[in-house]
């Protein structure tokens, strides 16, 4: 089994793992909880820059336990959530506005069964820095095929300052597990451009303290 299969594809396939993930990111006194909260705020702000209507379709993929769900209560989207793990989706379901959740659908992000160009907005969180380049490119290609508008992604960034931070963290906190496949910001931007997107904004979610960058993409005209 490859590292990707062990650490990401199959890693969230028990209800115990799903519950631990949700608790760690939303209830425990952890940095993950604080950074998740800051990320939710950034996402809300980025979504607010657009004028969404109640016919717009949003895809949250991979939705995990629905960390995006709470933010979506204040936007009018029809919502589709998708993940490879039914166990994660079971916990996600309760997070979205119930009257606008059109489905939690199991799919592999690299080859979903969704209609091409059928989503006005797609959000991809907590995935691209977990997978090797071939899977990242396959996922971005699929997202580009599904999108007809805006895509928001996040990704842990590989930079000299983040490498130094990780080294120091590993000394004082040996249990710390960094993202398996961080990417340089310039590489991520050029991969987005090569898959058919214009990068309209990119920023660090919590400069220095977190390695996560958020990128707002718009599909280029064909
Ligand atoms: C770190 S979690 C992130 C979940 C959520 N977006 C968040 O920010 O909390 C990674 C998720 O990716 C899902 N996943 C892993 N490989 C996948 C694939 N090939 N297609 C779809 N989902 C996948 C896992 O089941 C897990 O729920």
Image (cartoon, rainbow, N blue to C red):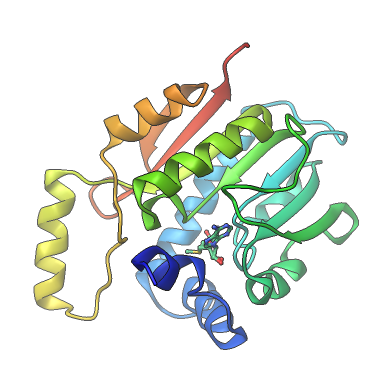
- Residue placed most toward the observer, 35 or 21: 21
User: Can see residue 92?
Assistant: yes
Which of the 4 quarters of the picture holds residue 160?
A: top left
Residue at (23% x, 81% y) in the render: 175
Instruction: Give the side of residue 34 with respect to residue 220, left or right.
Output: left
Examine the rendered structure and indicate whether residue 182 appears above or below residue 26: above
Report ligand 1 position as a quadrant. Answer: bottom right
Instruction: Give the side of residue 40 with respect to residue 89, left or right.
Output: left
Examine the rendered structure and indicate whether residue 107 appears above or below residue 112: below
Residue at (50% x, 66% y) in the render: 9
Q: Residue furthest top?
A: 221
Q: Quadrant of the C terminus?
A: top right
**Residue 60: image x %, image y %?**
66, 50
Residue at (56% x, 88% y) in the render: 16
Total tally of numbered discs in the picture: 0
**Residue 42: image x %, image y %?**
50, 44
- Residue placed most toward the observer, 197 or 6: 6
Which of the 4 quarters of the picture holds residue 92?
A: bottom right
Which of the 4 quarters of the picture holds residue 90?
A: bottom right
**Residue 46: image x %, image y %?**
56, 35
User: Can see residue 205?
Assistant: no
Q: Residue furthest front?
A: 1
Q: Quadrant of the N terminus?
A: bottom left
Q: Residue furthest right?
A: 99
Examine the rendered structure and indicate whether residue 178 appears above or below residue 44: below
**Residue 6: image x %, image y %?**
41, 73
Residue at (76% x, 70% y) in the render: 94
Q: Residue furthest bottom?
A: 16
Examine the rendered structure and indicate whether residue 151 appears above or below residue 222: below
């Amino acid at each position: 089994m490859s590292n990707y299969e062990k650490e990401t594809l199959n890693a969230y396939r028990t209800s115990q793992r799903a519950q631990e993930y949700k608790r760690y990111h939303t209830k425990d006194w952890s940095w993950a909880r604080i950074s998740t909260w800051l990320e939710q705020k950034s996402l809300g702000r980025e979504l607010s820059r657009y004028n969404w209507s109640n016919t717009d379709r949003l895809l949250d993929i991979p939705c995990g336990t629905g960390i995006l769900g709470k933010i979506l209560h204040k936007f009018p989207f029809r919502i589709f959530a998708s993940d490879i793990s039914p166990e994660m989706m079971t916990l996600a379901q309760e997070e979205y506005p119930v009257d606008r959740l059109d489905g939690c659908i199991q799919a592999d992000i690299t080859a979903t069964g969704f209609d091409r160009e059928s989503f006005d907005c797609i959000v991809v969180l907590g995935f691209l820095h977990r997978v090797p380049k071939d899977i990242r490119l396959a996922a971005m290609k699929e997202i580009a095929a599904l999108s007809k508008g805006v895509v928001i992604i996040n990704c842990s960034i590989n930079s000299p300052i983040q490498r130094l931070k990780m080294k120091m963290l590993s000394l004082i906190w040996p249990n710390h597990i960094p993202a398996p496949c961080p990417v340089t910001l310039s590489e991520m931007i050029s991969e987005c451009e090569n898959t058919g997107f214009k990068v309209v904004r990119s920023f660090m979610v919590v400069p220095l303290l977190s390695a996560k960058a958020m990128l707002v993409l718009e599909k280029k005209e064909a």
